[in-house]
Every structure is written in structure tokens, then in C-alpha cells.
Amino acid sequence: MARRLPPLNALRAFEAAARHLSFVDAADELAVTPAAVSHQVKALEAHLGVALFQRLPRGLVLTEQARILAPQLTRGFDRLAEAVARVRVDDVQTVLSVTVLPSFAVRWLLPRLAGFRRLNPGLEIEVRAQHQAVDFRGERVDIALRYGRGGWPGLHVERFLNDAVFPVCSPQLLDGPHPLLRPEDLRRHILIHDVLTGDDEPWVTWQHWLLHFGLDDIDHRRGPRYSDSHMMLEAAAAGEGVALGRSSIMADDLVRGRLIRPFPDIQVADYAYHFLCRTDAIDRPGVRAFRDWLVATAADDPTAPDAAAPAPALGG
């Protein structure tokens, strides 16, 4: 039986506009002009004989008919994309694309990737270091490793590595005219900051640590600021000052003695590292192999705190 369908471009334009409730954002996704999206939507409305949007000054509103059609189209396009991807790469995929935060890539993932290659000699990893959110629909990305509280609706998400937060510095700061031996000695030392720390991640900010120790006479905002944790820790290793770092990305430096913990106080981090992929991609052989290796490797990481265990009390 022949399928009587509207033009595919019209369906794609409507589905994108319905998701974004914007012709402009839909045009960005489809790499066409907003006028082209509007034209395709009008053509679809004419084909169906119904209005799909209320075009209001504040934006687009879906009509009742559009609310019926849009989710079905989204599911259909997702299944079509998955089918094409399976035919193209599932049995012959040799490169797996992984996007990861730069600091975690350099300080945790890359030193361990040789283990994955030994277990999977026919599968290569393409590592993309980036801070921005991942658009699995619009980017050719198989896996994302992200730091946060969780969430990411519509994706397969697994927490694989917890973190502990504590001050670190170069060993040279233990000597000199103002040795760093107690929290009070921070009054005489430079504080180093990671500017990408979120407001909902308080234990990686100096404000909370200083208040805990009763050091409210220290300006928690003073000191150099870096837009990446890797740069911040390199500055600390160079003796520039004291940084609040996370165990996952400091383990090798602590083992080698480039960084030390001047105080025993730690706190389990508010955020953790998560594995993300499309829900329809988790059973692809390459994606599953990377996930299994990642979880096993993180479980063997001696620096990771147990999230199920009570957090060590600061100062104790």
C-alpha cells in the first residue's frame, strides 16, 4: 500500500519549529533561513488543510492538531536516524567520538585510554574537549562525559565517578617565611580560583571553606582566576598559591608530589561525573564497550570517594 505523505522537507521544518517554538531556531538547526522554514510550514498546512501554529507577537503556539502531530514526527525522525546510524556504523564502526571537559580529558581520561585500546584493539577513540552542552541530535557525537548533579532528560545517563574537594598547593609553600601549615596560614597566601564553578557547587569555592574555619577576615574573592581547572592546578603546582581542587583530576599530581594537601580536611563534591549517550545508542557494541570499561576503571580509582558513605566532616 502506497504511503501518502507530505514532502519530507516540510515535515522536517515543522518538527524542528514545533520543538523550538521558533522558526529562527529551527532554521539554525536545519541550516536554512527562517523564511524557508516558514514557507515549508505553510506548505504543510496547505497540504493538511489545518493550521499548525498560532503566530503570536510573543512567539509560536502549537494548535491542537500540531500537538498531535509533532511528538509522533519527533519519534519517527529519531527512529529513522537510529536505523540509518545502525546500518552505517554499527557493524563497521571503528571510531567512537567522545566529548569531555578539557580538564577531565587531560588529567583523568587520557592517561587511562591505553587500557581501553588494549581491550578493544579494533576501536579508536576520538576525544573532543569542550565545555558547552552536547547536542546529540545535531552533532556527530557518540558519548559525552559531563560533570554535574545529574538530569539531562531524554538521554541515557549513568553516574560513574564521585569526587572529593580539598585545598592543594606546591610543596614549596610548606617552607619559607610564611609556611602553610594550618588553615589560619591562608591569610598570608594567594587563593587561586576556577571561574567556571557554579553557584550550586559551593564546596569548590573559597567562600565556604574560609567561613567554615572562621576566617571571615580573608577576602574570598582575592587571587588569580582561571577558566579551566587544569590551568588552575598548574598554577598551584608552580607555587602561585593555594587552589581548591577535585580528587579526580589531581590524583597523578598528588602521587608524584607536584601537589600536596596542606590540611587533612575534605568534602565530597556536590557534583559527580556522568556518562551520557542517546537512549537508543547504549546497546551499540562500541558505546557499550566504552561504558563498561569506563565504569570498571572508575571503580578501581583509589582517589574516588564513596558517595554512599557519609561525607567526612570538615575540620575533623
Image (cartoon, helix red, strand yellow):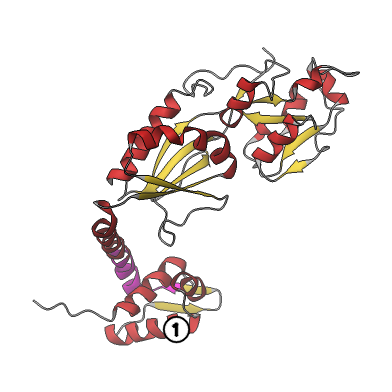
Q: Which residue lies furthest to the left in this view?
A: 1
Q: Give residue 159's position: percent from left, percent from top.
A: 44, 35
Residue 66 within the magenta-colored segment of the rendering: yes
Q: Mark 1 points at which residue?
A: 36
Residue 227: in sight, yes or no?
yes
Q: Give residue 3's position: percent from left, percent from top.
A: 15, 77
Q: Which residue is drawn at 71% across and 44% down?
A: 195
Q: Is residue 237 above or below residue 92?
A: above
Q: In which quarter of the image is residue 204?
A: top right
Callout 1 amino acid: Ala
* Magenta-colored segment: predominant secondary structure: helix
Q: Which residue is drawn at 57% across and 35% down?
A: 107
Q: Residue at x 81, y 38 (%)?
A: 221
Magenta segment boundaries in residue numbering: 61-73
Q: Quarter of the image for the N terminus: give it.
A: bottom left
Identify the secondary structure beneath mark 1.
helix
Q: Residue at x 30, y 70 (%)?
A: 69
